[in-house]
Amino acid sequence: MTFRAAVLQMRSVNREYESNIKTIIKYMSDAKQNGADILLLPECFITGYDLTIDNASAITENDLAPLCEKAKELRIGLVATALTKGKSNPQNSAFVISKDGKILMKYAKVHTCDFADEKVLESGTEFKVCVFDGVKIGIMICYDREYPESARVLMLKGAEIILVPNDCGSMRPRLQALSTRAYENMCGVAMANPNGENAGNSCAYSPICWDRNGECVDNTLLLADAGTEGLFYADFDMDAIRAYRESEMMGNTFRKVKAYAQLLNDEIQYPFDRKVIGV
């Protein structure tokens, strides 16, 4: 079984909701023609990554109706991204829409960038996994992927493929980190990032890092350049990935959980206490 992810590398237009939805529908059609199972968008594509949006201007699930209808018509899935209404402030969200047009999951970004403009957002409180067309999918959004705990929790919840809507630059270390997330959790990973100078580099990585003879293999399935706008594709061999997950020693095989209690300690000490050092 091959799971084909279409990855859109493109920047949407802030506040142009209807225009951005038309763009998504166009690329859903293109992705379907090229045999994709799901289309992955960059971060906040419907609304644009415009953090001046107030809660009243953010979207709701009802605004996804045209995309759900198109998904059902084309029989293609979608990871739709937007600033959405929260309790009092907007959330940075991703929706997994099935091939029959149903919203399988809404995920709100847990690791909002509280050191920057995203401090105005309402953070999500949990990482989530859903079953899409027989594949267990988890979502991380941009800054989430900087924390190994994000992908680890998704793996522990059963994720086989982790999809990452993204919008940032300085990609080289972040690409290395995503490859590592795939390796250490034995999960496939794909990321969509807008194109641009010092940006782009949408990518996908297989968890398979060595073959049956123990020889190292390149786990890169996709690595776009910085500037090209459009669709890229990543094919995940789910039969091979599942066989690999059943036999190799990463993921949740030999973890020593009793030694990890400090991970739940929320005390922040020097040099990481930004209030202490004046940041």
Image: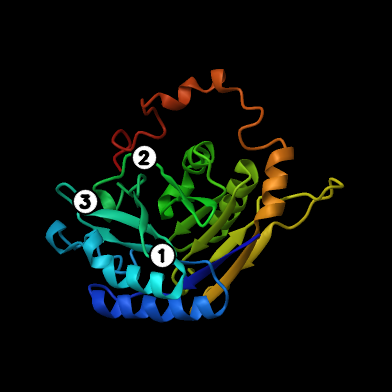
Which quadrant of the structure image shows residue 17?
A: bottom left
Q: In the rendered structure, which amino acid carries the disc numbered 2?
A: Glu
Mark closer to the chain start, 1 or 2: 1
* Callouts 1 and 2 close, C-beta under 8 Å: no
Percent position (x, y) of residue 134? Answer: 54, 53
Percent position (x, y) of residue 127? Answer: 40, 42
Q: In the rendered structure, which amino acid carries the disc numbered 3?
A: Val
User: Which residue in the protein does label 1 denote?
Assistant: 100
Above or below residue 117? Residue 73 is below
User: In what quadrant of the picture does the C terminus appear?
Assistant: top left
- Looking at the image, residue 145 sits to the left or right of residue 185; the answer is left
Mark closer to the chain start, 1 or 3: 1
Label drawn at residue 120: 3
Q: How many marks?
A: 3
Q: Which residue is nearer to you in this view: 74 or 19? A: 74
Please indicate, yes or no, whether residue 181 appears anywhere in the rendered image. yes
What separation in Å lies between label 2 and label 3 (alpha carbons)? 19 Å
Q: In the rendered structure, which amino acid carries the disc numbered 1?
A: Asp
Q: Nearer the viewer, mark 1 or mark 3?
A: 1
